[in-house]
Amino acid sequence: MEKLHIHNKMSPLFLLFISLLSFSLAYSNTPFKHFINCGSDSSVNVSGRTFVGDINSNSSFTLGNSEAIYSSSPLPNTSSLYRAARLFRQKSQFELSITKHGTYMVRLHFFAFESQGINLNNALFDVSTLNFSLLSKFRVQNSFPVIKEFFLTINVGKLGIQFSPSSFAFVNAIEVFLLPTNFIMDNATAVPSVKNEKGSYYGLLSKALQTIHRINVGGPEIKESNDSLWRNWMQDEGYVIYPTSAKTCAFYNGTLGEGPKPISDIAPDLVYRTCKEVKDNSREADLQNITWRFSVRKKTRHFVRFHFCNNIRAVFAFNLYIDGEKTKEINTYDYPNIYDLVVDSDDSGHLKISVGPNDHIDKQAYLNGLEIMEFVMNKSSVLALPPEGQQNKSLFIIIGSVGGVASVSILIFLIMLGRKWGRAKPVKEVALKAMLPCRIRSSHHRSIAKRNGIASPVPNLNLKLKISFAEIVAATKNFNKKFLIGEGGFGKVYKGILKNGMKVAVKRSDSSHGQGIPEFRTEVMVLSKIRHRHLVSLVGYCSEGAEMILVYEFMENGTLRDHLYKRKDKAKRLSMQSKLSWKQRLEICIGTAKGLHYLHTGLDGGIIHRDVKSTNILLDEYYVAKVADFGLSKSGPSDPDHFSMDIKGSFGYLDPEYFRTLQLTHKSDAYSFGVVLLEVLCARPPIVNSSQREEINLAEWGLFWQKRGELEKVIDPLLVGHINPPSLRKFGEIVENCLKLEGAGRPTMLDVCWDLEYALQLQQTAVHRMPHEDSNTDASAMVLPVAQRSSSNSFSVTEEKAPMGWDGGSNTTSALVESSYN
C-alpha cells in the first residue's frame, strides 16, 4: 500500500521536537568514543556528551608534555567547556586508545582567552596525526569557539594528535568517536578529471577529510543538540546565486520512508523534511536551475555529499551540475538517500552546484541538504614544501628548478629596478605574485582556507557588530542598482539605510575583484578594536553563507581624490570641483596624519595601514578626513629575520625600501602619505601617462622641483596665489622627509602632525620673515603664473596605471561613498 504523504506547513517547534525524538535514539551510545575537557579536572555535559577532564583522569588517553591553563575571567554565557585549555610550549601529543577499526569523527575545539599573562590569541601552531597535516600555521583570533572537524579512518591501537607550536599551542576540547559502518564508502562517483578508467574515485578511506560546509537546504539552522552526531547545519539562503529561481518546499510532516540506512545515521530528520525546488514556468535560462555557490580552497580535491528525499512527489529524475557542467542524472526516492561525488575545485575559489530539470522526464528538481569536505593534505606532501621560515630563503633555488633561469633573471631585474629607481617603479602585489611558482604562492591560498569548517566562510569575528543578511537586503532594497555607488577591489558598494534610519555604505564581496576572506577578516578585526575621529567607523558586518559584507558609516563628501582631480570619466556625474582651499587641504592632511599616528601607536605594537592613498581617505559632511580600508593592514613591523614575497600595496604609493628589502615598517605608511601630500598639492595622480619620463611618477616629479626650490611651479592651478610661501616651503620639507629612500630617515606620523600644524599656522598668520626669505614677496598677493607649471598641464589623468598585465591597484574603499551623484 502506498504511503500517505501529507504536504503541510509545520511549526519549527514541532519539527525540532521530531528531531529531538530521533536524537534520543541516536548513535551516541557507541562505546568507541573520547570526549575530553582539556586542561580541566572536572567533567562537562554538552548536548548529551560528557567531556571528561584530562587532569587525574583514568580514561584511555595519555597527555604529552603540556600544562593546564584556566580562564582568569571567563566571559558570561561561555560554556564551561571553554574555561580551561591544555597548553603546549613544545612539540607534544595526545595519545588516545582506539579499540575498533573504522571511520572516526575527530573534532578539535579552540577558544582563545587570557590567563596568567598568556593570551591564547597569540598562539601559532600546527596540528597533525601520523599521516596527515590537519592544521597548518593555525591561529585563533576570535571571541567565540572555533571547531575544526575531520573524518579519519583509524586502525586499532593509538591515535596520536600532535601539536607543534611556532609560539605555543593549545586546545580546549577533543572529540573522537566511531561513525556508523559504511558512513563513508571507499569509492564514490567522480567528475571526469578525477575518476579512473572505471568511472569512480577509489581509496576514500585512506584519505582524511575536513568539513568546509554543511547546509540544510530550504530549512532552518540545525544546532548540534538536534543532530545525533552533533553536527551543525547552516541555512542555504546566503549561498543561492539566483534566489528567484527557487522556492522553499512546504514543510513535510508525513512519515519518512525507510531507506537502507537509519535516518539519524545519515542526517537529522529535519534535513529531509525541507528542501528547495526549481520554480516552474521560468523563461530565463539562468533561472531554470537552482545554483548554490560555496567558497572553497582553490585547486583542491573535495568530497561532496548530496541529501535527497522525494517528499514533493512531483519529480523522480533530474540533473546535477558542478560548475555548470552536467555531472549526473539523479533518481530519487521517498526515503532519505545520499549521493557522493569527488570533484576538484578550479582557481576561482568557488564551487558552484546546481540542480535542474531533465527535459525528457520531469520539469522539476530539488535538493534537501549538502555537505562539502576538503581532502586534507598528506603529511609527506607538507614536508616536501620548504618550512615556512625558509620558503623565501630558498626562493631563487625553487624558482630556478621550476621556472628556469628566465624567472631568476626577471626577479633580479625587478629588485635591481627597485634599488635603482626607488620610487619610480613600485610593484603591486599581484604583479610580483604572478611571477612566482605555485609552491611559493600556496601559503597565501592556505591562509584563505583557514575558516570555520562548519559555518560560513568567515566565522563570527565580533558578535556585537554582526548584522543579518536580511537587514542588509532591506537596507539596500535587495541591492537595487539605484543604490549602487561604486565598485572596488572587494566588490560592489551600495548606499543603504538601516532600520534605525542610519545611512551606511554597504560593501559586498565579489571574488572576481581579487580580494576575499583575508581582507574581510582583517578589516573586521582591525576596525572592531579601534575607534578614532579620523578613522572610518565599521557599523557592522555579515558573514552568512557565502556572503561577506562590510557596513560602514556613510561619508557624504566622498574620497579625497574626488575633490582633487577633474576626471573625464566622472565629469557628468560629479557636481564637486577641485575647490578645496589650501587651509582645507592642510586640515584634511592633518586629520589623516592623526588617524595614522593613532594606528601606529595603538595596541599590539601598532597597526601598519599598508595602503595609504587618496581614495582611502574619506570626507564626511564637514570635510573631516577619515582613513579607511584596512583590508591589507598588518599588526606591527615585519620580523627582521624573515621576509615575505607577499608584497601588498598600490602602484605609485609603494615604499621603495619595502619593495627592495621586503621589510614592512610604520615608515612605509609615511612614504605613501608623502605621495598623498603631493597629490593634495599638485592635484594629479601618482602615476600618469606622459611623453616626458620625469613627469610619470609624482614622487620623483615633486622631489625634483622641491630640491630645486621651485615647488610652486607644479602646484594645482586653483591654489596659485592662495598659498603663503612659508607655508608652501614648510609643506615641501614635510614631503621631502616622508619620501626619503631609507625609512630610518623618515619622520613618524606624530612628527608629521606637528609639522603640518605649523604649515597651517604659517598659512593663517603673518610670520616674521627669516633673513634668507625674499622680503620683496608679498604673500597675500603672491601670484604664480600658470605658464611656469612646466609641461605638467599636458599629461592625461589616469587611474594609477601599471604596465600592461598588472593589476592597477587594490582600492576597495573609493566606492564606499556617494560622490554627490545618483
Image (tube, grey):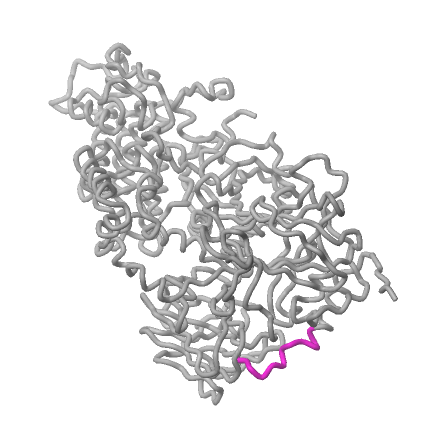
Q: Quadrant of the N terminus?
A: bottom right
At 57% from the left edge and 37% from the top edge, which residue is drawn? 503
Identify the residue at the far left of this view: 771
Q: Answer with the quarter of the image where residue 456 lies.
A: bottom right
From this view, report whether residue 110 is shown above or below residue 658. Answer: below
Residue at (47%, 67%) from the top-left corner? 207
The x, y position of residue 647, in whole percent, is 31, 44
Q: Which quadrant would the C terminus be assigned to in this image?
A: top right
Residue 154 location (% of width, % of height): 48, 76
Q: Residue furthest right?
A: 1
The image shows residue 392, relative to residue 99, as above or below, that is above
Residue 149 in view, yes or no = no
The vertical placement of 153 against 569, above or below, is below
Q: Position of residue 576 (x, y in %)?
A: 47, 21
* Residue 358 image position (x, y, % from top left): 71, 46
Note whether residue 224 is visible.
yes
Which residue is rendered at x = 45% and y = 46% of the image? 347
819 displayed left or right of 355: left
Question: Relative to 115, does residue 611 appear above or below in the rendering?
Answer: above
Front residue of 74/242: it is 242
Give 784 or 447, whichever is nearer the viewer.
447
- Residue 25 belongs to the span the image colors magenta: yes
- Residue 184 within the magenta-colored segment of the rendering: no
* Magenta residues, start to end: 23-34
The quarter of the picture where residue 565 lies is top left
Q: Residue furthest front?
A: 197
Number of numbered markers: 0
Left or right: 576, with 729 as reference point: right
